[in-house]
Image: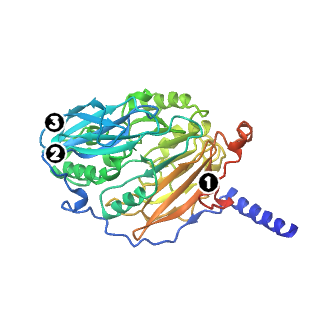
Amino acid sequence: MGSTLLQLLLICYVFLSLVANGSAGITSTFIRSEWPSVDIPLDNEVFAVPKGYNAPQQVHITQGDYDGKAVIISWVTPDEPGPSQVRYGTLQKKYDFTAEGMVKNYTFYNYTSGYIHQCLVEGLEYDTKYYYEIGNGDSARDFWFQTPPKIDPDAPYKFGIIGDLGQTYNSLSTIEHYMQSGGQAVLFVGDLSYSDRYKYHDVGVRWDTWGRFVERSAAYQPWMWSAGNHEIEYMPYMGEVIPFKSYLYRYPTPYAASKSSNPLWYAIRRASAHVIVLSSYSPFVKYTPQWEWLEEEFKRVDREKTPWLIVLMHAPIYNSNDAHYMEGESMRVVFESWFVQYKVDVVYAGHVHAYERSYRISNIHHNVSGGDHYPVFDKSAPVYITVGDGGNQEGLASSFRDPQPEYSAFREASYGHCTLEIKNRTHALYHWNRNDDGKRVATDSFVLHNQYWGSNQRRRKLKKNHLHSVITSIPIPLSQRL
């Protein structure tokens, strides 16, 4: 018995030594036999227009306030404005409440959008299923959503994380697999429709098809949006020079609730998580509005109430793929020291059409006159995860840099999505699920330890029942715990 225990301890020591020295990173050898990276044809049923005159379409919801007691419901009517009213209640087909929204539309070259409705539904109860109806008469459509539990450090919650989705058959595989995961809300890390890969009238048409494409999920649970480079749509040859025009008309965010001056960067609190959304393609250096907002937002984070601190951005600041290599470096220089100072748990990004996860590392000691010239292991730093593998028409980024950097824990060029299942204030389960020939395959999994409550001093503050909470749903070895 003693020798067996000694052997086990020796194995653990060797493995952890390898991890500490960055030698245990994995570059997957899996080769994806992908479907063609082309957009699904316009006449496919996944883009079907709802039946009925002026029937609402492209329905989607997002969180509408800071703390999860409101939603913004958005939809489009194609023929005429119609009412911007949402009828809702806690019983199906029995709507005791109404909310009035606003309607607008826009032009893009020679395309004119449908009538875009956005309605704030607020004053909701936590942890409650609401049914809602939009539209008129025989063309009315009904949906439902579930509000999150109240803000509480031990509130369990499951987020899905998707990026660079597009509207190919690979995209469809990703969204269908996510819908089977039990995720309760999506954190979307940018690059939605890839409409900018089209020209002229077709740019707007492909925004419409994408809205109908994601409605199967986004009408029933909130998707929290962040913008990527494909949302910029700077197209001077068409006379279109206002960045993010289509995106900002179609996908609202609750930016004012977090005292942001711009819908491209904002924050929300949901269950036990504080989520910060950054804009990789807006000014972010010192003294800019985004920089000044983030400085104040970090100060507002209360880890006693929302222990899980999550940051979203589009361009990854750690990336060992040849695609978009070093594009996030300028944001890393500006913000990484704050990520370490405030002990961010995890940073999600997209942009690179592959999957990669880092160890907890930082490069905050390097400057133009001295310091370490490479990332070092840092227990106060976040885990960086790139999940730009939703399935868009540009295909996979299959060329990783060799050798694999010491900071890189796992990387693979496949399509998929990931989930973060918060169990309590100390532990969360993380999964990256590969879309393997149409099947959802859990490929990279580990237990994530909370940065704030993970310290011994704070853990001692927990009650006995918290200390004895056991995560049993998935057997994850000690070597995969961060």
Verify CB contact (< 8 Å) between mark 1 and mark 3.
no
Q: Is residue 403 visible?
A: no
Dot placed on the residue nearer the N-terminal end, 3 or 2: 3
* Residue highlighted by disc 1: 447
Identified by mark 3, the residue type is Gly
* Image colouring: rainbow
Element under label 3?
loop
Element under label 2?
helix
C-alpha separation, residue under disc 3 versus residue under disc 2: 13 Å
Does residue 43 lie above or below 372 as drawn? below
Q: How many marks?
A: 3
Dot placed on the residue nearer the N-terminal end, 1 or 2: 2
Identified by mark 2, the residue type is Asp
Indicate the position of residue 157 as horizontal and vertical percent values: 52, 45
* Residue highlighted by disc 2: 138
Disc number lying in front (3 or 2): 2
Dot placed on the residue nearer the N-terminal end, 1 or 3: 3
Direction from residue 467 to residue 236 in the image, left or right: left
* Residue highlighted by disc 3: 82
